[in-house]
Image: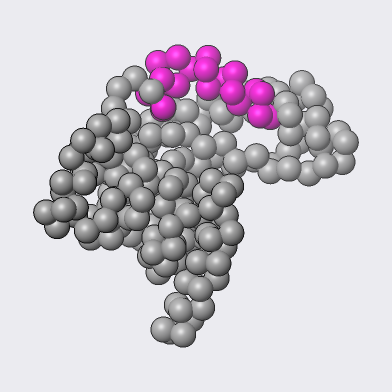
Amino acid sequence: MLGHRGVRLGITYPEITEMQTRAIIEAACQLAKEKIKVVPEIMIPLVGHVKELRDQKAVVDRVAAETMKAHGVKIQYLVGTMIEVPRGAVTADQIAQEAQFFSFGTNDLTQLTFGFSRDDVGKFLRIYQDKKILDKDPFSSIDVDGVGAIVAIGVQRGRQTRKDLKIGVCGEHGGDPASIHFFEKTGMDYVSASPYRIPVARLAAAQAALSVKVGD
């Protein structure tokens, strides 16, 4: 996820963040008027520096306040970030000063940690596996020693700052049983996966929770 996208786009074009925030909060306000309570979680992607998140959170909070005032409704919402950049994980203690939740985007974290691109990894990944350079496709099952170590640092440092920080993972790894067992050990709260992988993910999550309890 190199280039002018994610949080970088929101910083240079704050009107995009304003528009998306207004849409989310307006929808929540309309539901609140119908006695349906929702708590939106507004996630800022590709944050690698706490000042990036601080900049965008200020925009979100301002627009949310304006929108709630216009609708005459008060709602609760959370602002968090997706940890996809290695620097974001390494400085998670700082980022957690502003973020109310983390979601690890492990697909992009894998890209940025290895320096691989999913666009062309298929050209050489099979050779890497044949030569036993890599045992598994790191985009299908998490690389515990490398990417996993960065995830563990992010979880631990984030909770140093905010003990109740809700942390999850989003991506293909969220539906892989071996990866789910690893995420359980790191203390994550949830995994997110594509619909067809949910049954496998739920079973693996239950097994992982039991195995950790037995291990304790």
Q: x, y (%) of residue 146? A: 23, 55
Q: How many marks?
A: 0
Colour scheme in use: one colour
Give percent across and percent down for residue 92: 35, 49
Name the image quarter holding residue 54.
Answer: top left
Q: Does 206 appear in magenta? A: no
The quadrant of the rendering that contains the C terminus is bottom left
Q: Main secondary structure of the magenta part?
A: helix
For the record, the magenta segment spans: 6-25
Residue in front for this viewpoint, 60 or 24:
24
Quarter of the N terminus within the rendering: top left
Residue 29 in the image: above or below residue 210: above
Left or right position of 127 against 186: left
Q: Residue 115: x percent and y percent?
A: 20, 38
> Toward the viewer: 102 or 161?
102
- Give left or right: position of 121 versus 105: left
Q: Is residue 102 visible?
A: no
Farthest right residue in view: 34
* Relative horizontal placement of residue 90, taking residue 197 as reference (left or right): left
Q: Is residue 10 magenta?
A: yes
- The residue at 41%/20% (across/down) is 9
Residue 85 sits in quarter: top left
Residue placed at 57% from the left, 20% from the top? 18
Residue pictured at 37% horizontal, 47% vertical: 106
Q: Quadrant of residue 63?
A: top right
One can see residue 50 in this view: yes
What x and y, as percent, mark residue 191? 51, 55
Q: Residue at x 44, y 63 (%)?
A: 177
Seen from the viewer's position, the closer of residues 4 and 32 is 4
